[in-house]
Image: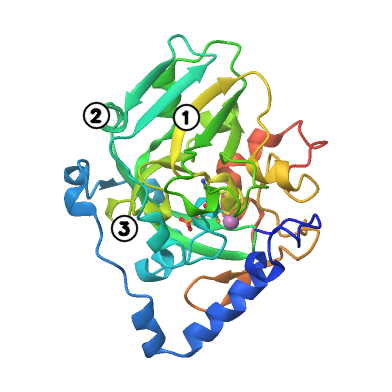
Amino acid sequence: MLIKRNRGWEIPEARVTPEHVFFSRRRLMAAGAGAMALAAVKPARAETDPSAALYPAKPNPAFGDAGRPVTAEADNANFNNYYEFGTSKQIADAARALPVRPWTITIDGEVEKPATIAIDDLFRQVTFEERIYRHRCVEAWSMVVPWTGFPLSRLVEIARPTSNARYLRFETFNKPEVAVGQKDGLFTSFPWPYVEGVTMAEAMNELPLMVTGAYGKPLPNSMGAPLRLHLPWKYGFKSIKGIVKVSFVAERPVSFWEQLGPEEYGFWANVNPEVAHPRWSQASEEVLGTGERIPTVLFNGYGAQVAGLYKGLESEKLYM
Ligand SMILES: Nc1nc2c(c(=O)[nH]1)N[C@H]1C(S)=C(S)[C@@H](COP(=O)(O)O)O[C@H]1N2
Ligand SMILES: [Mo]
């Protein structure tokens, strides 16, 4: 992610330019087998995770094939966007500092009974399933991931929102004592905590997944443990990680990226190859781990499920 504002005095340009990361990564891949060793997956903490027995979850046959090969776990585990732990893609080590138990989720706002639930108690109220989804980052790279989790609509059911609820506002932890990217003096201009939002109609769609695991195991911290969202038809920044709070609200939430650069990152952020980012084309995407470039598809290919959500909203900036 890159912000357009003149923040060179705050963040060295090279550290946030996606192209920079891309090119260095490509070189790494081109170096071949030797470089692959660098990308070896570190031992998972799955053995100690209290939810480990819930894996692997039953595959949902409706989402058993994303039409493209699944991205190698090693490629995904070593190429992440998680600004709480730094602006590079290599944040997996830094992210290990985050304690993911005990962990609570607060559900508040326009709901019958606001509550704070221990994550494993929440997991006991839902049924895990596996879905293979395409993920398209706004930086024009993509991957395919076998996620484990439960539908966001199930969380809405548990929360029991009132008729005043029009949006869901998600919030990530704010722990500068463990998250290096949130520490004072590093990126203080970032409006922590990370926030994202969807409409109630989007939340009730069949696609949004509250993600607890990937590749048949609990999520590693780098991918957003213990709970993140995945919205496969939207740019990746909407898929918020490390969630601690879900608020049901009447007003449209302003996301982290929208606060930083409203002329570049909006509320809807639906994938559309025909609407360029102000500074780069969205017509194609690099397939993570392959060096291959493929055409980008409207709604990331999920139009059959989601296009109807946007009828009557054509005047909105649906694609940024
Ligand atoms: N809390 C938080 N969530 C986040 C981000 C972030 O920096 N912080 N980055 C987003 C972006 S830009 C993308 S592409 C995806 C990346 O998910 P991955 O690292 O599992 O590939 O996470 C999204 N969720
Ligand atoms: Mo992204």
Q: Nearer the viewer, mark 3 or mark 1?
A: 1
Q: Quadrant of residue 110?
A: top right
Whole-percent x, y for residue 53 in the image: 16, 44
* Label 1 sits on residue: 245
The disc labelled 1 sits on which kind of residue? Answer: Lys
Q: Give the mark nearer the N terminus: 2 vs 1.
A: 2
Q: Is residue 256 visible?
A: yes
Quadrant containing the N terminus in the rendered view: bottom right
Q: Give the mark nearer the N terminus: 3 vs 2.
A: 2
Q: Is residue 130 above or below residue 125?
A: below
Q: Is residue 262 left or right of residue 66?
A: right
**Neighbour tally class for label 3: few under 14, some 14-19, many 20 plus, Cα within 10 Å:** some
Q: Is residue 55 above or below residue 134?
A: above
Q: Is residue 232 visible?
A: no
SS state under label 1: strand
* Label 2 sits on residue: 124
Q: Nearer the viewer, mark 2 or mark 1?
A: 1
- Check if mark 3's residue and mark 2's residue have beta carbons within 8 Å: no
* Label 3 sits on residue: 215
Q: Residue at x 22, y 41 (%)?
A: 51
Tell me the distance, in whole angstroms, between the alpha carbons under discs 3 and 1.
25 Å
On whether ligand 1 comes within 8 Å of the CB at mark 3, the answer is no
Query: In front here: 265 or 16?
Result: 16
Q: Is residue 139 left or right of residue 108?
A: right
